[in-house]
Amino acid sequence: MLSDEGVRHNRNNQRIEGGEDMENSKTRLLEKLASGEAHVAVIGLGYVGLPLAVVFAESGYRVTGIDLDERKVNAINCGSSYIDDVSQRSVQDLVCQHKLSATSDFSVIAQCDAVSICVPTPLRKTGDPDISYIVSVTEQLAKYLLPGMVVVLESTTYPGTTLEIVLPLLSKSAHRLKVGENFFLAFSPERVDPGRTDWTTRTTPKVIGGITPDCLEVAKAYYGRAIDTLVPVSSTEAAEMVKLLENTFRAVNIGLVNEVLLMCDRLGLDVWEVIDAAASKPFGFMKFTPGPGLGGHCIPIDPLYLSWKLRTLNYTARFIELASEVNTSMPRYWAQKVQDALNEAGKPLKSSNILVLGVAYKKEVGDVRESPALDIIHDLAQKGAVVQYHDPHVATLSHDGVEMSGVSDLPAALCEADCVVIVTDHSVYDWEEIRKSSPLLVDTRRALAQALPQPNPGPEQPQEPAIQD
Ligand code: SAJ
């Protein structure tokens, strides 16, 4: 966070003109936020932006969502939600009450008091951060930014983005803006966990850091109306780092538990038994589970934003890079398990019918971004297997230029498969039925443990083989 001196220094870097009455800018903005009469813009209406727009509108603000995807804009203006975690009813009611609308026209920002930016931060093909969405949206925003406004960046990014990239772009505005004086800038990372219902956008504590103390004060007033618990930190860089720690923590621990699986495989131990027993420790242990690899557009990617930033500072973030190496090796491990299972059954992988159960990156969602299932399908197909998939949440998918449609007749597909590989353990699956119908099974999630307990077959009865892992 820039101190007051920093702001004065910052001011010297900016053209100064007969200034807006600074104190008034802040006071008037705080009054609008407190009364709920503020008009808010949310840029980016995906799984983060739409829930945020809804919770802002429900708190009393008038909200205009901005997105370049006309389908999203039209859906919202028709009172329809395209995000599973946002009910149709909530969008419909808010649109009818004129508390929520959407547009692809950035000029609406000139009528707003507050703006939140919720755009993607993917990786480039080189593996480096791609903040082009943040830059392009900020350049648009700068055209319409006026004194007396607050801007909050939510997109997960490396420490320094808000201060070093967003602030200079916004300061190019024609309106002699002075951060912390007549406009306010903060960073507040999103913590949306798709599919989760126990913690929502409103109830999940939200970290927030400002460029200056006044920026933090205004951003807290902006978010405090809609979010139950705010967690203020000393700067935007600290807030950016908090988010990366959260997701790096997950990626590294998932990498560790995947390596424990590889170890147990070589030791002839049941990794699930080991983890379940370790999880009985009431303190000092947090359970993570091995699986097919690391999917989603956050956990596999966010830590690489941090390791990239540290490389620019001549530091190698070894845990991040090692975890990424282990996690990205898991699809190949499981494809080999399928080949081994078929081999045990005297069948070549080549030309065998493989059914992949679940292709979403985790259960109960329909998102296939970075899903390890795609790599497993790719590996098996490359070895000559005939691969189909079933996923109740994913009707079609395209990967490596290959378009696939999920099978619709699951019972038939189970019987026709030479091997079934469980990749995503959606709750809707009848695991007992799958266990009984599949000639050969590879279970990357220990989903079959959810099958009904088998009646005790009595002494000396052979257990049906279900290849676990
Ligand atoms: N996974 C494992 N083993 C585990 C946990 C997860 O293999 O023990 C896998 C999952 O199958 C999935 C990937 O890791 O492929 C990511 O899992 P996730 O539950 O972290 O899923 P995300 O990326 O949808 O959500 C996370 C959020 N998750 C939780 O906090 C539980 C949260 O960290 C962020 O809000 C969100 O990413 C984000 O947007 O950053």
Image (tube, helix red, strand yellow):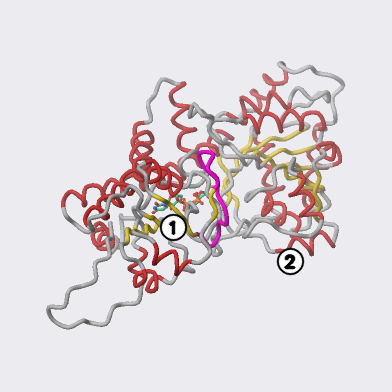
Q: Residue at x 72, y 52 (%)?
A: 53
Quarter of the image for the C terminus: give it.
bottom left
Q: Which mark is residue 89?
A: 2
Name the amino acid type tagged 1.
Thr
In the image, taking residue 318 as reference, residue 207 lies left or right, namely: right
Q: Residue at x 47, y 66 (%)?
A: 410
Q: Nearer the viewer, mark 1 or mark 2?
A: 1
- In the rendered image, which residue does mark 1 sit on? 424
Q: Is residue 263 magenta?
A: no
Q: Position of residue 253 (x, y in %)?
A: 35, 47
Q: Give the residues drawn in magenta, as a range.
A: 391-403
Q: Earlier in the sequence, mark 1 or mark 2?
A: 2
Q: Position of residue 41 (x, y in %)?
A: 77, 44
- In the rendered view, tell whether residue 243 sits above or below residue 135: below
Q: Out of 427 and 197, give the one closest to the viewer.
A: 427
Label 1 beta carbon within 8 A of ligand 1: yes
